[in-house]
Image (tube, rainbow, N blue to C red):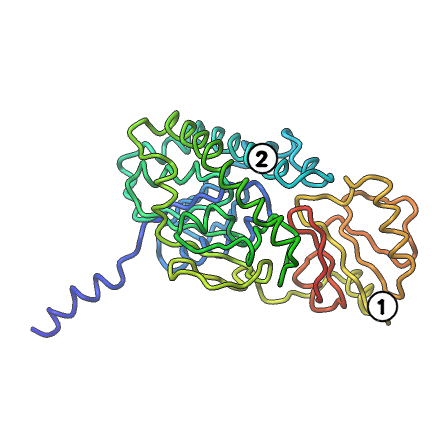
Amino acid sequence: MKALLIFPLLWTVIDCANILAIFHMPSYSHQVVFQPIWRELSLRGHQVTVITSHPLNDPTLKNLTEIDVSALNLDIPKKMRLMHYIEKDQPIHVKVQKVVEVNYEIAEVLLSDKRVIGVYNNSASKFDLVLVQPYMPPTLFAIAAKLKLPFVGISSFGAFFPSYYAMGNPHPPSLYSDIYLPYHGRMTFSERLRSTLFYLWHRYYWTFHALPKCDQIAKKYLGHDLPYIGDIERNMSLLLLSNPILYERRPNVPTIIDLEMLHVKPVKPLPADLKQFLDNAKQGVIYFSLGSNVLSAGLTENLRKVLMEAFSELPYQVLWKFEDDKLPGKPKNVEIRKWIPQQDVLGKVVIFWMSLVGIISMSTG
């Protein structure tokens, strides 16, 4: 009799979920954080359907369905000249508006794709949960509302003002600046003032411009019976934030959780020529990369010259992620590569110089 009572309990415990994941930002640096999540969920027996621009294409993951939208959204940032606005010395509100406009376009393209329509209009798809990237406009949150499902936000870096606000998390701008602002740690009075002014502008822009536009797009494709997109945004069950090293640590409500090292993998051996370059650098190596979005090859000639002059005066070797075959005027101590196994290199450098949303910052490697 005891065995008969325990068996139904075990059956409930090992029941797996059917999960829909929407990771729409067409950037490798975003997707590389999310990939271990949907891989691990699949390995643990959950049925996972992922809308992504960077599928794993791993045939060993039998219960994973990937909807590859790279042909739809990879060219949108380039077509809309997003990097031009991010890289140039533009006012921060101009950059934010451009990022939001790019996300409008991505949402429209995805919501009108037949494969994605088949997901949110298929009553036979009995999903239990939606995972979604809370990157700027919350338009795609509406898919969870359409399916009447709880949804969890997973960010590849910190949250923006609207996400904290939607989750009911206090966000005094005099203490914590937005991730788009270049202020870190304890801010000066001038920085606190600018952070507050940006916060006030952002709240106005989000409330009266961004959210109404998102609501219009969502209802155009998903139906006019949906709740207002701002109400959907506030209905997020959980917000998971990756890479807390990139933003100021702060107290959060229980429904906001920091995750660490999701994308970190065991170190692999370096290619022989790259290993030799690092081993022969007696003073050490500086690794310089602008990431997968901002391309070094796209920098202005003047900025490239400034960087090369600075590098040439250093006693270190410099490993530079540079996307062209040649760099005219390259100093002798600089080695260029189109793509670098970043994680495998970081343990062997003295400084890692990186770009975050167009803002160049330094961190020790």
Q: Residues within 10 Å of mark 1 (few under 14, many from 20)?
A: some
The quadrant of the picture occupied by the C terminus is bottom right
User: According to the image, label 2 marks what residue?
Assistant: 97
Label tally: 2
Give the left or right position of residue 295, taking residue 191 as reference. Answer: right
Q: Mark 1 or mark 2, which is nearer to you?
A: 2
Q: Residues within 10 Å of mark 2 (few under 14, many from 20)?
A: some
Q: CA distance from mark 1 to mark 2?
A: 44 Å
Label 1 SS: loop
> Where residue 304 appears, x then y in whole percent?
84, 45
Disc 1 residue type (three-letter): Ala
> Where residue 363 appears, x then y in whole percent?
70, 63
Name the disc covering residue 281, or none: 1
Give the left or right position of residue 140, taking residue 286 as reference. Answer: left
- The residue located at (65%, 33%) in the rendering is 78
Give the left or right position of residue 29, taking residue 150 as reference. Answer: right
Disc 2 residue type (three-letter): Gln
